[in-house]
Image: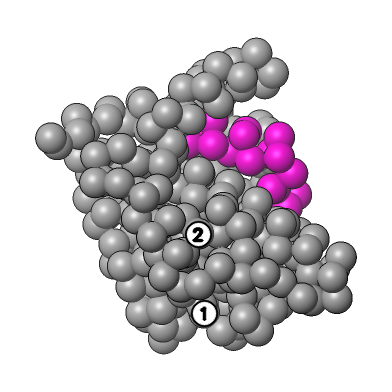
Amino acid sequence: MARPTPSEREVRIDLAAAYRLAAQRGWDDTIYTHLSASVPGEPGHYLINPFGARFDEITASSLVKVDVAGRVADGSGASVNPTGFAIHGAVHSARADAACVIHLHTPWGVALSMLPDGLQATSQFAMRLHGRLGRHAYEGLALGAAEQARLVAHLGTLDGLILDNHGTLTVGRTVAEAWMLSYLLDRAAQAQLTAMAATGGRLRVVSDEIAELTRRQWVGDGSELDGDLEWPALLRGLDRSLPGYRD
């Protein structure tokens, strides 16, 4: 059964909530990194945070509408980060199914990006992403057209990327799905790195067969996405702890 298309207002509320939930978990990096979402019914346009705003300040109305080239399309004249739309615009252009793109520099995600073997099947969190993460080599701060093409190729149809020596990126068919995949990736990275520190790098890694079985059990028949159940509960908590994101 097809999901109803959300309104722009609904997407704005979810994306603003995603920013504030990220801030609560320490995923922000002062004014850097970004969460973006496609604008329903407006192909080639997406919402992103205004450059200079903290994650915990984002509201539904403060999100900026831009095109895939990063040009502000809502008449606000707001400033957006060029490297933000270089990454996000490339992914949105290549993946029509990527309704939300999340790029973060969390401490656990950055540490994971330094490991040659990346994320391993060492926790149930990690098994949800088994075989679903690509890698993109570090090429410096700027993303030109050539690197954008390489990043998109490395992502392919996967759920995300480990950006080597940089951070993480996840995509989702909804804001909630992308946020939950970022949550699972960060928890998996924390669990793996903590175990490595405690054991000198020795890990109990589950076989590929069991890891893939677990992933298939997790995603089921695809009718229920990550975030479908969790998102309403997360929003209830946010309404109590950090309201105002719906404004």
Q: Three-letter amino acid code at disc 2?
A: Met
Relative to 99, say whether 154 is above or below. below
* Tag shown at residue 136: 1
* Tag shown at residue 127: 2
Q: Residue 41 at x, y = what percent?
A: 20, 40
Q: Is residue 88 shown to the viewer in this render? A: no
Relative to 10, say whether 102 is above or below. below
Relative to 228, say whether 241 is above or below. above
Say left or right for 181 vs 191.
left
Q: CA distance from mark 1 to mark 2?
A: 20 Å
Q: Three-letter amino acid code at disc 1?
A: His
Q: Is residue 40 shown to the viewer in this render? A: yes
In this rendered view, identify the residue nearer to me: 246 or 179.
Answer: 179
> What segment is highlighted magenta in the picture?
15-31
Relative to 204, say whether 71 is above or below. above
Residue 198 shown in magenta: no
Q: Pick whichever of labels 1 and 2 is earlier in the sequence.
A: 2
